[in-house]
Each structure stands twice: as C-alpha cells, then as structure tokens.
Image: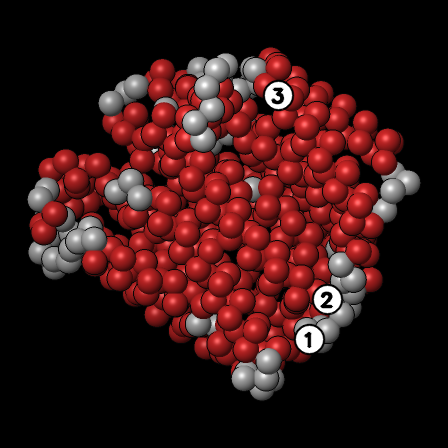
Amino acid sequence: MSNIRRQSIISSIVIYIGFAVGMINTYIFTSKEYFTEEQYGLTTVFIAIAMLMSSLANMAMPAFIFKFYHYYNDNLPPRKNDMITWSLLVSLFGFLLVLAGGLIFKNLVIQKFSANSQLLVVYYYWVFPLGLGLTIYSVLEAYTWSIGKPIITSFIKEVQWRLLITIFIVLFITGFIKDFDLFIKFFAFTYPGIAVSLFIYLLVKKKIHFTFSVSKVSRRFFNKILALCLYFYGGTLIFTLSQIFDSLVIASVLDNGLGKAGIFALATVMTSVIQAPQRGIIASSISHLSKAWKEKNMALLQKVYQRSSINQLIFACAIFLLIWLNFTDAINTFQLKPSYLAGAWVFFILGLTKIVDMGTGVNSQIIATSTFWKFELFSGIILIVIMLPLTYILAKQYDIIGPAIGSLVSITIYNIIRILFLWKKFKLFPFTVHSIHTLLLAAACYFICYFSFREIHGLAGMIIRSMVFIILYGAGAMYLKLSPDIQPVLQTIKKRFGIKGN
C-alpha cells in the first residue's frame, strides 16, 4: 500500500499542477476578451469527439495490456515481448477504419450539427489528428502504467498537454497566431504532440521494444485475448460515450449549441478538478490490482478497494464544496463572461456525480482486472441504456441542466450495480462507518462557512471561506481518523521538513 500511496500522492500533485495550468487556459478562454463561447465550445467538442474516436480505434488494447501485461512480462525477455507491437498496430488499423467512417458519414455529421454548431462543420477534418494522437497515447499510457511509471504519464497528459495549449493561446493573444482559424489547427496537434513525447521517453529509458514475431504467450492466450478485447471494446466505447454524450447532445440539439457547450464545458472543467485524485489512484493501483488477482490476494483487493473509496471521498467532498462555496464569486471577481453564471447548477449536479463515482472506489478497475471482466460490458450497457435517452430528453426539457441530471441518475445506478456485484461475487465492499462521517463532516463545514461568510464577496470572501473550510475540514478529518493513510502522509511530510514529535 505504501507504494500505491506514494505514487497516488505524487500523481495527484502532478495532476493538480496540470489543473492549475488548465485553469489559466480556461480563464483566458472564458474571459471577456480573445475567445467567444462558441470558440471555446468548439475546443471542448473537439476533445469529446477525439475521445470517441480513440475508444473506437484502440480496439480495447489498453484493457489487453492491463490484463495480460504480467503474463508477458513474467514469461518473455523484453526483446521478445510482442505486446506493445501488436497493440500499436491494431490501434493504428482501428484508426484507419475510424477515418474511413468519418469520411463516409461526413454528410450525416454536417446534417446533425450544421444548424447549431457551424464551427464544428467548418473544422470537421481537423478533429482527426487530435483523435489519432489520443489513440496512440492511450495505448502507450496503458503500457507505461503497467510497467509501474504512472507519474510520467500524469505529467505528460495533465501538465505538458495543457502547457502546449497555453503556448498556443499566448501566441494567439500576441498575434503570432493571427486568427482562430490557425489556432484551432495548432490545437488539433496537441494530442499527437504528447503521444510523441511519451514514445520518446519509453525509447530513451529502453522500456519499449518492438518485434514482429508472434510470441508463445500471444499464441497460448490468443483466444482469451480476443474474447477480452471483444467484450472490453464494447464496454470502453460505452463508457466513453457516457462521458462525452452530454456535450455532443448540447452542441447538436440546443440553440446556439457550441456556445452552450462552452458554458457546460466550464462546469465540466471545474468538476474535473474534483476528479484529480481518482486519476492518480487509478494510475497507481491498476498494476497492483492485476497482480493481486493473478496471486488471488483478496485481502489486498479489499484493502485497495476501501482505501481508494474513503481517500477519494474525502478529497472529492472537500474540493467540490470549496468550489461550490466560491463559484459565483469567482466568475464575478475574475470578470468572466456573465453567461458562464448559467453553469453554476450544472457544476453542482456534476459535482455530486463525481462524489458518487469517486466515493465508490476503484470498482471498475477491480472488475476489469478480474476473471469477471465481462461484467464491465454488461454494466456498461445498463449505463448507456439509461443515460442516452435520459440525457436527450432532459436536454430538450431543461436545457444544459438536463444532461447533468441525466449523468447523476445514470452514474449512481451504474455504481450501485457494480458495488452489489463485487459484494455478491467476492465479498468486497468499499464503505465503512467513516464514509458516513466524511459526508456529515463535509456538510457541517460547508454550512458553517456559507452562513458565516455569505455577506462577504469578492476575493476577500473567497479567501476567508476557503481558509476556514480547509482548517475545519482538515482538523475534523484528522480528529476522526477518517483514513488510515492520513497519519502516514503527515509523518512523511514532517520527516521531509525535519519536524519532530507527534
């Protein structure tokens, strides 16, 4: 657990650095100068489509790597390990199929988006480089996680990628990039840029080798690999669609679709700040979960499951309430476009969705690395059957708040199903009494700060509310000993700074 804890903390710190850069980018995108709501909305829809392309193209190769890495690594010397070779080749072939489909169905896309999202139609072809880059990166990222190097992927994807966007924004503002037309074309190559960076890292560190000979492991497990990929392909596609469907619906069916997608995107960006610890924990735990299943170490699985649940719940509640306490003041104080105030309740509902998802721990990763990985597809089908019609209907009725409600309802049901499955099959359960204590503590701290300082606005109000909340919440978490990881982390911090005593 200490290795998972260390890597999770470092990865989370790196991810938050990336979010800090992302916040600067978002501020510029949403401030009163430089970019319109439609232009910002286009960048977010570009990313959503690239994620869908990647899920279609990678043919479940990341799942294949997560599940079978230890079998290849334990039975083959590095230069005869053909896992990454076939993973990349299959993904490239998959992207060619996606590219062909994109060209064939271009007129259908234009028909769906031309009325409310004209900019997407204009720059239709430029989403393909973005999709290709994310496809290659997703495969290399899965491989890098499996070799126990999650921190470098967190840095490249969360920090370097956003810094590339920052550079292009600065060049746009200063006039070196003369117009938005050129900016969005540079933006389309940000994912290919980080894919190249990760590939170079693996080459330099001699962690990646290529061979076109079919290994004994590939021959022995071919049928199982094929079955896993077929199931996970559908599951991954379903999960990705559930993540980005709301943005696509907003862009296609609502008036001023890209503009509202931009407002929705600001709320989504703020909720992604809540999700940072989840990314770090998943990146750090996936290799250990896979090995625990291989060794049938149920005690370790239960430990990781409960620790991931309480740690993520503590962080999610804290960050969600900190942002919610200051959401409206932040938009007014930093002089963002007033139109973005419409995203306040979208953020609130999406924030609750993240708390539900994070508070249930790494249940998806536990199922995905188990022998019951097929259940990921079945639960994913349930998710999509609920989410897609609900999102569409609610968007028509309640505008941009509708998709947020659809996400909360469907993700809650989805996680309940997975919790029940893991309990019934393996007697694994994420919650303890500290889960309830965390929710009660968070609610108490929020109401104390809200009612005590609701008349204080501007930067002073934001600072006071935030500092008091952090002190109350942090002190309460330590007093109640909500997580067994709190004390080791504090001891590590004390040791680093030379502080003695308890």
When the figure is inspected, residue 264 is found, relative to residue 76, above or below; the finding is below
CA–CA distance in space, label 1 to label 2: 8 Å
Q: Secondary structure at mark 1?
A: loop
Mark 2: amino acid: Ser
Snapshot quadrant of residue 462: top right
Q: Nearer the viewer, residue 443 or 41?
A: 443
Snapshot quadrant of residue 56: bottom left
Q: Secondary structure at mark 3?
A: helix
Mark 1: amino acid: Tyr
> Looking at the rendered structure, which numbered label has been put on residue 31?
2
When the figure is inspected, residue 66 is found, relative to residue 105, above or below; the finding is above
What colour scheme does the image use?
A: secondary structure
- Dot 1: few (<14), some (14–19), or many (≥20) neighbours within 10 Å? some
Q: Which residue is mark 3?
A: 477
Determine the residue positioned at 68% across, 75% down.
Answer: 34
Q: Position of residue 27 (x, y in %)?
A: 67, 61
- The answer to whether the residues at label 1 and label 3 have Cβ atoms under 8 Å apart is no
- The answer to whether the residues at label 1 and label 2 have Cβ atoms under 8 Å apart is yes
- The answer to whether the residues at label 2 and label 3 have Cβ atoms under 8 Å apart is no
Q: Position of residue 233 (x, y in %)?
A: 39, 49
For residue 81, side relative to residue 21 (left or right)? left
Q: Which residue is mark 1?
A: 34
CA–CA distance in space, label 2 to label 3: 36 Å
Question: Mark 3 or mark 1, which is nearer the start of the sequence?
Answer: 1
Residue 26 visible, this angle: yes
Residue 430 visible, this angle: no
CA–CA distance in space, label 1 to label 3: 43 Å
Snapshot quadrant of residue 109: bottom right
Q: Secondary structure at mark 2?
A: loop
Q: Position of residue 164 (x, y in %)?
A: 47, 67
